[in-house]
Amino acid sequence: MMLLLALLLQLLQLSPRAAAFDPDQEDFLSDEEQRARNYLDYVDAEFARRSTAAVRAAWDYASNITDENLARKLEVSAENARYQKQQWQETIKYHWQSFRDADLRRQFKKYAVLGTAALSEEKHDKLEKLISEMESIYSKAKICDYKNSSKCDLSLEPELVEVLRTSRDPGELQHVWLEWRRVSGEKCRASYEHYVALSNEAASLNNFTDNAEYWLTDYEANDFPEQVDRLWKQLEPLYKQLHAYVRRKLREAYGDEVVSARGPIPAHLLGNMWSQTWNNILDITTPYPQVEAVDVTSQMVKQGYKPLKMFQLAEEFFVSLNLSAMPESFWQDSILEKPTDRDIVCHASAWDFYDGKDFRIKQCTQINMQHLFTAHHEMGHVQYFLQYRDQPTVYKEGANPGFHEAVGDVMSLSVSTPRHMRELGLLDADAVDDRAAAVNYLYLQGLQKIAFLPSALLMDVWRWDVFKGRTASDRYNCDWWKLREKYQGIEPPTDRTEDDFDPGAKYHIIASVPYIRYFVSYVIQFQFHRSLCQVAGQFDPDNPEKMPLHECDIYQSKEAGNLLGKMLQMGSSRPWTDAMQVVTGQREMDASGLLQYFSPLLEWLQQENNRTGEYIGWEPTTKVCVSSREELERLRGVETATEG
């Protein structure tokens, strides 16, 4: 996940002051454009300097959660907000809407929004503090062990992640699932209500109807939610086939009393705290268990892998494409392992310090295949930083937020192939290449890619509804579970209430990080992959059976790297449709690449689900969500009396 600063401003409609200008004199316009260029030179340098200071303060806090570091982070943020508001008054004096230079107009358009600095100083500081406090609650949260109630020092990473990965005891899984939400999300609920109000107020002061509209401006399309919905409708049949198969395998593992044949899947059984990736249940769901699966975690451990080596392999992959190596300071200043002497925000993230030199990753790396992919993902962000570092500060971001998330994942699509795992010496050279092995491989990819799609979508659908007032604060949790059932087909392990706040058990929710970027990235990465594979000579669209897309590994293809680099160097200097066209020749998001990649798996899933007579989809959950725990106890009392 890339850190996005409020200082890097988003797009805004024309301010009323600028709209009133209608110059009659050509000379006047030329003179003002020259003055505007000189002004932008100053603003660019000043915003770069201030962004560097803000990122440094944010890094210090995220890498060492102390009151002192929090105070410094908030102090720098408040100082920058004051400057931003002052500078905005100068920016809107220019009649940039009439400039003939498109690049000049684009930069001014980005600078013409004030962001959260539009709030009063007191409210701005309050908003920043709310987010930081929720992050602190999340990062410091610990629960007690299921089998030893006196041991109460289990953090999300690595302890709870490991329990969810390895335990097959539904009681233990339910304990971890419930307790994590009690010590994280539940404690953030009151703060989140204030956060929503202040975020909407800031958006309104910037001439947006609400914070949802403000978040979506980077996608430069008024119908973006509709575009996303159309993509999901393309992808939903594939997801439902995977869901039906996984539900059957979990029912076989846990019994009909735990997993129903036609209902949603209990969320705590999917191997992930948020049920968004399912690769940790590969061992009990794999299609062909007698065939070696491409999960090389055990080999990584056996060969003595360390976090440093995992990131060095990621760097070597990028270098093989004729892209940039990491600067020496990256290796000196990044945090690649969880420290033992302090609390940090463990959520993996990449950091651009906006000085063209300092780039870092912070990751509590574990020795497993998934974290090897995460290392490539985070280094993909840094590669993007490196490629666009010569752009003006306001353009130092992805073409849209989904682009930034997609770059590293494109690399992972190659790294995860059996071919590349053999290259790394993590898979036997004589491993069988047949249909069963291909299905196993694509199934593992599907547990990570296909399973993730509805989760990534609903997280922001929920927040859009919250910001727009369609979901009131007294419906936060129940509406959350309505969407989880609608899109994912999952249910909580127990009844829930509005005293709970399950959305807040996810980092991106309490940290105010938009999530639709991940849905976008999981679609467009397959568009990029297909085009790069063609350039690398490893995919033939006219003969996909001979050269399947899922077997492509672009490692060492300078042609693919050079093409990708052209897009990365653009940053956000052009609309994302232009950037998309550079690599793919297309100007819109298209799910056909993903569907083509997974077509052999879809065929197998359909055959398997037909063979076993699986119900495709899910009937309504039997779990309830009510206003309070008192109301839940009352309902349970009525049910008990009725049964008696």
Image (tube, rainbow, N blue to C red):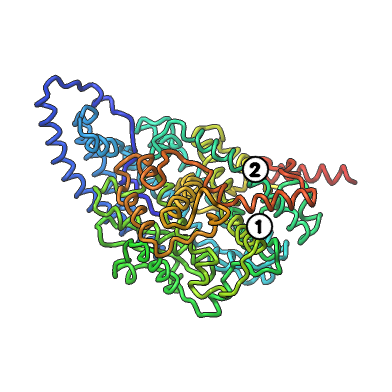
The residue positioned 25% from the left and 61% from the top of the image is: 357
Quadrant, the N terminus: bottom left
Image coords of residue 46 (percent x, y): 20, 49
Q: Helix, strand or loop at disc 1?
A: loop
Q: Is residue 641 shown to the viewer in this render? A: yes
| Position of residue 101 in the picture relative to residue 613 (left or right) | left
Comparing labels 1 and 2, the label whose residue is closer to the camera? 2
Count of picture labels: 2
Asked if residue 274 lies left or right of residue 567, the reply is right
Q: Residues within 10 Å of mark 1 (few under 14, many from 20)?
A: many
Q: Amino acid at mark 2?
A: Pro
Residue in the foreground of this view, choosing between 5 and 281: 281
Q: Residue 346 location in percent, x, y?
A: 47, 63
Residue identified by numbered label 1: 270
On screen, residue 55 versus residue 228, left or right, reads left
> Where's residue 338, x and y in %?
46, 70
User: Badge 2 local density, few (<14 within 10 Å), some, or many (20+)?
Assistant: some
The answer for how far apart the CA atoms under marks 1 and 2 are is 20 Å
Residue at x 49%, y 50% (from the top left corner): 526
The foreground one among 72 and 92 is: 92
Q: Secondary structure at mark 2?
A: helix
Please, is residue 206 above or below residue 23 in the view? Answer: below
Can you tell which quarter of the image residue 213 is in? top left
Instruction: List the residue tagged with mark 2.
Output: 237
- Looking at the picture, does residue 517 appear above or below residue 434? above
Look at label 1 and name its amino acid. Leu
Pick out the residue farthest to the right.
644
In depth, the one of 579 and 201 nearer the eye is 579
Asked if the residue at tag 2 contacts the one at tag 1, i.e. Cβ–Cβ closer than 8 Å, the answer is no
